Amino acid sequence: FMSRSGERYGDEKGRDSGRVEKGDSPPPAPTVARLSTARGQSPFSAGSLSYESTVWVDSETCVGVRFGIRRVSFGRRIELARRIREIGRGAEFMDASGDAREKMDAAVMAAEIDRAYLEWGLIGVEGLEIDGAAATGAALIESGPVELAAEALKRIKRECGLTEDERKN
């Protein structure tokens, strides 16, 4: 390795030996990706290290309604992956076959996976009543407007970092 002053350090093959000679500088630090939201704003508040683990989104399909979704964390990603794995064990095999019944089973599994995303990521709904009662995440999934549930699902999958193709599956 070369120091910033142009001097070599490390072993004869240029590998870092863990020894730094006097006057040597350590290699440059790796680039760190910035944590940002879908809108390009940091989830950290300015001047502090406060982190919001949820985000509230104004609905585009239901004016005056907003819903809260969880941000992905290491532990939450593991929890979601376990849920999806359990549901989707046979979905790819069934979808690849030509049998109509297996394709139907695969479609049901895909819907169950979408439901798991909603149950995992949707924390609340504001500004909506369903059957005369304030909407909850569970009520939206069971009885709410399909368009709003689809919008929430799309935002949850986006928060998880899924590509458009992965979201379709």
Image (cartoon, rainbow, N blue to C red):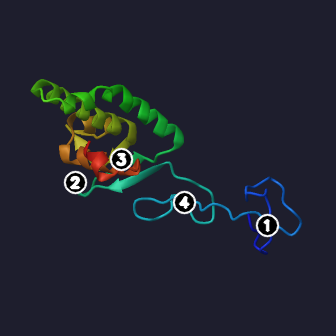
Q: CA distance from mark 3 to mark 1?
A: 49 Å
In this rendering, position of residue 44 left or right of residue 120 = right
In the rendered image, which residue does mark 4 sit on? 33
User: Residue 131's spot in the image, x, y percent?
Assistant: 19, 37
Residue at figure coordinates x 21%, y 28% from the top left: 94
Q: CA distance from mark 2 to mark 4?
A: 34 Å
User: Residue 24's spot in the image, x, y percent?
Assistant: 82, 67
Count of residue discs: 4
112 or 163: nearer the eye? 163
The crowding category of the residue bearing disc 4, from other C-alpha atoms within 10 Å (few below 14, some 14 to 19, many at least 20), is few
Residue kind at label 1, given as amino acid type = Arg
- Check residue 8 in the rendering and tell me which mark sits there, or answer none: 1
Residue kind at label 3, given as amino acid type = Ile
In the rendered image, which residue does mark 2 sit on? 62
Indicate whether 128 appears above or below 30. above
Q: CA distance from mark 3 to mark 2?
A: 17 Å
Q: CA distance from mark 4 to mark 1?
A: 29 Å
Circles 2 and 1, Cβ within 8 Å, touching? The answer is no
Please tell me whether mark 2 or mark 4 is closer to you in this view: 4
Circles 3 and 2, Cβ within 8 Å, touching? The answer is no
In the rendered image, which residue does mark 3 sit on? 156
